[in-house]
Amino acid sequence: MLAFTSRPALGLLAILLCASLQLTGCGGGGGNSASPGTPSTPANDDTPTGNTGGDGDSNDDDAGTPVNLSWGEAYQRDEEYPNTVNLPQQLITMRDGIRLAATVTLPADASGNAIDGPFPVIATFTGYNQFLSSSLIADLDLVKHGYAYINVDMRGTGASEGSWQAFSQVDQDDMAELVEYIKTQPWSNGRIGMNGPSYMGITGLLTGAQEDPAVQAIFAVVPMGDAYRDIVFSGGQVNAGFIPLWMALVTGLGVIPTSVGFENGDPAYSLTTLLQHLEGALVDFQVPVIAGALIGDENRFDTEFWRIRSPWSKSTRSVRPPLWSAG
């Protein structure tokens, strides 16, 4: 019988997630998160003032250009709800039958009863096991201010079915389906903001690049822009220190059993998902990618494999030619 992780036992989780954040060089989210569709109007409407660049020289091309903004006072708004509550684990079925696991957190009353929506939604699409990490990633302050929060494990990671592909077109098609799913839920008012650091920032940018009008804000903390140059082949040399450790972290968090199957009437879910993750690691992604880097396959160049995973390519590909080519 598999042992399942309880939510209060977060010691190991904290260590693993801290390691993931250190490995990816990212900071935390915090209270500056994306806020689409503020539920209530703030008491004051301070207009930001811009500081200007330049040193006063009239020949300075940057003179008079705003370089940052400041408000007269910090934005403040009282909490609207005293508590938060997690709904039972969700399994969201994709177009090919693969199910993605999700945690939905809603505002609650003092007794912990969920408040009827709909609410604007903050979404985080992660690779770091949302069942274990939702209490660390979800911004409960935002939830108490009148937002729903959904954390979703991407395909092949955490408690989701399938094979991990790390920001591939399959992942991006999943992101589009997840946005459609969120828009139709009773707790959602159809207005979505993406939030998260590193991995979650990348998925936020890739989701926003699809230009669904429902996605109205993105708060992406230290995401990569160019997978090839920023992460994998910085300076032209394969990043053999980071990539294997990162892949091992995502894979390891994906083999920890959770209760999602039992909460959805599928007791064998964790076992079948584990087998899918291990098969995917050996055949589809992790091992083949690392082996290819070691032997110098075609992806040692800036190929479509990297470009499809790079947020910058969604807007600048036509004006930024690759530095290397496989031709």
Image (cartoon, grey):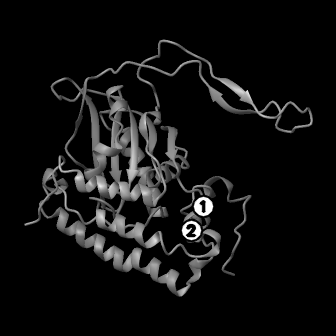
Amino acid beneath label 1: Asp
Tell me what residue is drawn at x 32 percent, y 66 percent: 162
User: Which sits in the foreground, 269 or 241?
Assistant: 241
Identify the element where label 2 is drawn: helix
The answer to which of 186 and 2 lies nearer the viewer is 2
Q: For the residues labelled 2 and 1, say whether their Cβ atoms are less than 8 Å apart.
A: yes
On the image, the x and y values in percent for residue 180 come to: 40, 45
Residue extending farthest to the front is 55
Residue 1 appears at what percent x and percent y? Answer: 7, 66
Residue that carries the numbered disc 1 in the rendered image: 226
Density class for disc 1 (Cα within 10 Å; few <14, some 14-19, many ≥20) is: some
Asked whether, in this view, residue 138 is left or right of residue 319, the answer is: left
Of tags 2 and 1, the one toward the viewer is 1
Label 2 Cα crowd, 10 Å radius (few <14 / some 14-19 / many 20+)? some
**Spatial distance from mark 2 to mark 1, Cα to Cα?**
8 Å
Q: Quadrant of the C terminus?
A: bottom right
- Residue 237 sits in quarter: bottom right
In this rendering, the count of numbered labels is 2
Residue 220 in the image: state x and y as whole percent: 51, 45
Above or below: residue 113 compared with residue 268: above
Please state if 100 lies on the left or on the right of 313 as rendered. Answer: left
The first of marks 2 and 1 along the sequence is 1
Residue furthest to the left in view is 1
Q: Is residue 60 left or right of residue 253?
A: right
- Asked whether residue 91 appears in the rendered view, the answer is no
Height in image: 282 above or below 107? below
Which residue is the site of mark 2?
306
Answer whether residue 270 is visible to the viewer in this image: yes
Q: Position of residue 15 (x, y in %)?
A: 30, 56
